[in-house]
Image (tube, grey):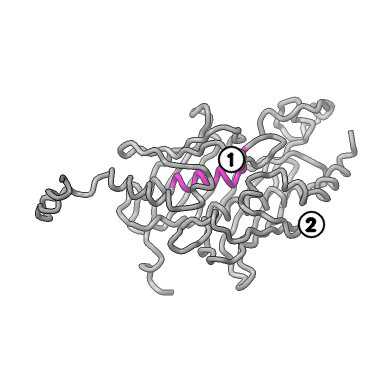
Amino acid sequence: MLQIIRKALPQSLKRPPLMTDRAASLQALLRRAPYVQTLNMRCDIRGDEMTGIMRFDPRLIGNSAKNVLHGGAIGSFLEITAMAQVFLLGDLDTPPRPINLTIDYLRAGQAEDMYARAIVTKMGRRIANVQCAAWQSDREKPIASLRANFMLLPMETLPEK
Amino acid sequence: MPDPENQADIIRENMAKAIAYIPWAKETGFELCSFTKDRVSGKINWRESLIGDPETGVIHGGAITSLLDSLAGMAVIAALNTFKSTATLDLRIDYMRPARKGLTIYGEAECYHMTRTIAFIRGRAYHEEDDKTIATATGTFALNRIENWSTGKHVADNPQSASAKSEKAPSDD
């Protein structure tokens, strides 16, 4: 019923895009990406706050003897959390593409769930700079942090070489 | 306790088998191609579970990070003369171009400098078909003598701790 009324309204009276719409497209984007599912991760979005969550799974282990998470899995988790935060703040439909990233490994990742939050340091027209940190049981003791640059524009829109 | 020199050889000889104890390497389809003191190489075949963008079928950058992270760690182990525990300090990845759908991603890494406490590595990922670099990696690893595991001391090559030889697992490294 509501949809019928909204359709009948003139364009100018329709509501502007809301953060919740942006969140919905981000969730759809993450759901469609097989690698995000392989990592067993999702994003919890409350307003403009977003937390990446990687549920522990034995497949994420990098050293069975020490029972710690693989550095590649932790790095991927940080990268996707950072990408998601940039996407959430942006207005493009295509996912931001990483240009480069640096992962600092601070502590071994234990066989537990992992969380991450990202801060967009600069949102440019073409490039975004992001910082991201991951923790487990104690947020004061980060497991790893990431600094990355993302290209916002899709490949097709970039000028020819 | 076996001779440390032989320990390093044993690790080198059994590296291919050791990968079976890295579940994430198995999950991402990592395969070791070569393992010598100067260089290690490996690959991941294109597979659906690694796709980042379903529109293009391109493998996610994170899978390439995982490949290069594994190879970097192995390059450090390959270069060691005596066995030490290794812990990644940092890893930087530069993405040159997207990987191509359906193609195997090859990776290689080398340890180009080592001090008593730190190993410096560089590596790259590429497609064999056109030899174009997909991504480059540089990283550093902290080295700890295994004797220090039991003492909890993470100051590598501390002569004071060399006498402690308990078999206890490391608490943190």
Q: Which mark is residue A105?
A: 1
* Kind of residue at disc 1: Tyr
Please give the residue where the numbered disc 2 appears in the rendered image. Answer: B36
Chief secondary structure of the magenta portion: helix
Q: How many marks?
A: 2
Q: Nearer the viewer, residue A28 or B113?
A: A28
Dividing the image into 4 quarters, which one contains the C terminus of chain A? Answer: bottom left
Image quarter where the N terminus of chain A lies is top left
Give the letter of the chain under mark 2. Answer: B
| Identity of the residue drawn at 84% across and 27% down | B163
Residue occupying the point 77% across, 56% down: B35
Helix, strand or loop at mark 1: strand
Instruction: Verify whether residue A55 appears in magenta.
Output: no
Badge 2, how many Cα within 10 Å: few under 14, some, many 20+? some
Residue B137 left/right relative to A149? right
Q: Quadrant of residue B122?
A: bottom right
Does residue B142 sit above or below B136 in this rendering? Answer: above
Residue A154: give x, y in percent of width and height.
38, 63
Q: Callout 2, which amino acid?
A: Thr
The percent position of residue B150, horizontal first and vertical second, equals 76, 26
Q: Is residue B42 left or right of residue B91?
A: right
User: Is residue A5 found left or right of A99 in the rendered image?
Assistant: left
**Image location (x, y in percent) of residue A120:** 38, 45
- Foreground residue among A132 and A68: A68
Q: Identify the secondary structure beneath mark 2.
A: loop
Residue A74 covered by magenta stretch = yes
